[in-house]
Amino acid sequence: MNLSRRTALLGLATSVSLGRASLALASAPTEKRLVVIILRGALDGMAAVVPYGDPDLATLRGELVPPAPGQANGLLDLGGFFGLHPALAGVHEMYKDDEVLAIHAVAGCYRVRSHFEAQDYLESGADYRMTSGWLNRAVGSLPASGTSRPDGEALAVGVAVPLLLRGPAVIANWAPRGFVQPAPDLYATIAALNQSDPVTGPAMAEGLRARGFSASVMTGEEEPKDKSAFPTLAHSAGEMLRAPDGPRIAALEIGGWDTHTAQVNRLNGPLKQLDAGLVALKTALGPAWAQTAVLVMTEFGRTARVNGTKGTDHGTATVAFVLGGAIAGGRVKATWPGLGPGQLLENRDLAPTLDLRGVAKGILSRHLGLDAAGLARVFPDSENVAAMAGLMRA
Amino acid sequence: MEILTAQALVRFGLGRRGGEPLPSDPAAWLLDQLQQPDPTRLDEPPTTAAGLTALREDRATKPPPGESRSRALFKVQAAAQIANAITTPSPFRERLVWFWTNHFTVSLRRGQCTAVAAAFVEEAIRPHVIGRFSDMVLAVMRHPAMLLYLDNATSFGPDSPLGQRTHRGLNENLARECMELHTVSPLAGYTQADVTSFAKILTGWSVDLKADPPGFRYRPFAHQPGVHWVLQQQFPPDEAGGIAALAFLANHPATHRFLATKLVCHFVADDPPPDAVRVIETVLRDTNGDLFTASAALLKLPAAWQPATKLRTPMEYVIASVRALDVPPDEMPNLLGILAGLGQPFWSPPAPNGWPDRAIDWAAPEALLRRIDWASAFAARVGGRDVVEVADNTLGPLLRAETREAIRHAGSRRDAMTLLLTSPEFQRR
């Protein structure tokens, strides 16, 4: 398939800016699929999965709480205590099919309220910034790693590789083109002139390889209908992950969660994008969905109280989602800390009772077969964080 | 061309423009740019009042996306900024304007900033790049673009008369980013309580859209009463408290360390040499944050004259390309669309920490291939120029023999120009 065909497939032929969404992929010696979605900007977990059964919620949140389940535009019930935000209707359908596990009052291993530090730590998998991301180290730790794939180890789509996928395992990337391209022999001369440069040399070689690699995995299917960036990229990710010789690991990201003001209105758009993206991913994966685990995570939660501008400020614990055909879902997993006096962290944030690394470890061990040594490489200094059991279908 | 001259043009400048005259003493040429008045003359200088008036009208008339007065104003003003960068005889000074604009990011990703982003650069940044850092901080924090971008315009003291009446309260966004990104940085070891307290200090610093002309307004009725503490320092109530707190933060030792690190990272190397950072930090401390002296000190760092340690950002790359080809103004391509395509849409960083400043952040494989694709499209403008001459003009002794050979043997002038623009020596600075 030629480049313009692939560009058309992505539905982005005229738009070279991907806005706040991006996608990166890596191949791996497994038939299982793993997708990690980073919500950059801090999703308010108590708005996505609302603990409407908590008697202290209304005092803290007031008008930020949607109507109860069953009412117009009300919450989508998750078993009597928690309710899903009404914009997540597609996720709710998957929940009813036991494919979604919501994990609440969860947080990373760091306690900072800076987006930039927290995102670095979330992607590093540590409470300090590492030069590689935990998903890259996971790819490098897979049991059969070393068996080389004929068409390259990894592929990233977008103009930047997120820290989550940076590291020793090789990552390439490509994105919908925006400019007329030179002939192949000119590319080759350019690459040769850059060969000695430690930065531009390897990156150009990888980029050229990735463009070729992409052509072999993208099969000629219909253009996705939803033109918005995140669902479009999620659909493309699903198609590439589905292909027999395609990548197995994908990292997607979507922004827009930093709702300091007018949260009720501002959260609708990103949640709908996320919901449409997850549905598009499932649709595009087709039969491979049964082999798929998706982890949706954000750097931290937001304050339990509404702030002075009908929004919420940077907090601590939040919600994560684990979903896919391989997931034992249909539940909310939480040790609910409560919202009453004395129960909030620093009298401010939802208190964390679960460690996000435990969730990731549970997926990496039970879904991708990483052993204890591999998990220790992926998440340094995490000996006392057990892999969460019961995430996967038996 | 001497190697130091070539280095001055790319390291501290924006690349040589065509065959413009070369300075005989490169260090003196750079210093002179700081000693002369800023030569920037924009046809219609952007103002906050005009920007906010456009925003006010857009809110009243609700035009379809892309057809707002704000957007129209931005396009004209952004084009003027880019044209100024292409033609300026003081490229070092312009680089400082870019550096500080990125340090104090306001981004068009927040739509309200669209019509005031240019005014922000011209009013809060440009006048202060060789002045005192504390003056720049104060100008930035009072500027409607920043107050809108980071939500302070609607942050009310919960115990203020307005907060009590409207039941609206604090928004700590600006206070947190001012401490984390603009001044002391996490090096200072501040706590959540410091952030909350500083947010209270800044309550009332707001934007009056209804006034004529619209602009910054301190609203005493929105200010959280009482004295407040930040980093063990006590600050008085009212507007004076905010002014004092900003002066304190701007002159904090952690701020000097943080700014020195960023400046050296930008002008010297991705991994800033610690002794170079120490020199700049000491200058900032000894001069109470005098940016003229600090900028001049950068020129004296031996490490700053090591060639090609930095990778040009898309913005630096595109401007240098246009300058190298000396494209006439009426043949200028639409650089706004190009910058977006190369991953650096104008004045639109994704987050308040601005654009990244290290090679690894701009050297994703696809990002570099896009540069190649753009360069090959842009190289079509080469016309009848002698590409070896263009290469010698723009890079001088930095041009490698192998690149010169490849240019000489290219199949067309356009391919030759593509090879020049995509060579590592042209992509680095």
Image: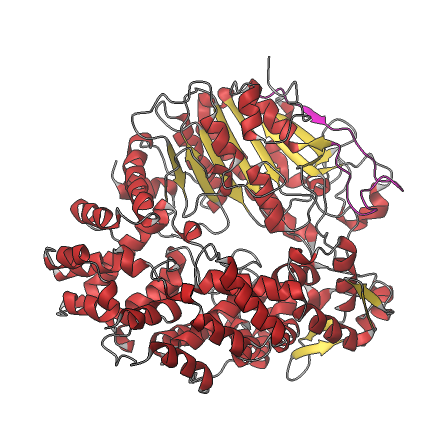
Q: Which residues fall within the magenta stretch?
A: A327-353
Where residue B349 sits in the image (x, y, percent)?
A: 50, 59
Residue located at (34% from left, 45% from top): A203
Q: Residue at 56%, 25% (x, y): give it.
A: A375
Image quarter of residue A319 = top right
Note whether A294 is above or below B366 in the view shown.
above
Residue A251 x/y as whole percent: 49, 36
Residue A325 can be seen in this image: no
Q: Nearer the viewer, residue B180 or B303?
A: B303
As drawn, A394 above or below B362: above
Q: Is residue A350 depicted above or below B84 in this figure?
A: above
Compared with residue A33, is residue A168 higher up or lower down, i.e. above or below? Answer: below
Nearer the observer, A172 or A6:
A172
The residue closer to the viewer here, B23 or B131, is: B23
Taking the view exactly as shown, the residue that stands out farthest to the bottom is B37
* Residue B24 shows up from this direction: yes
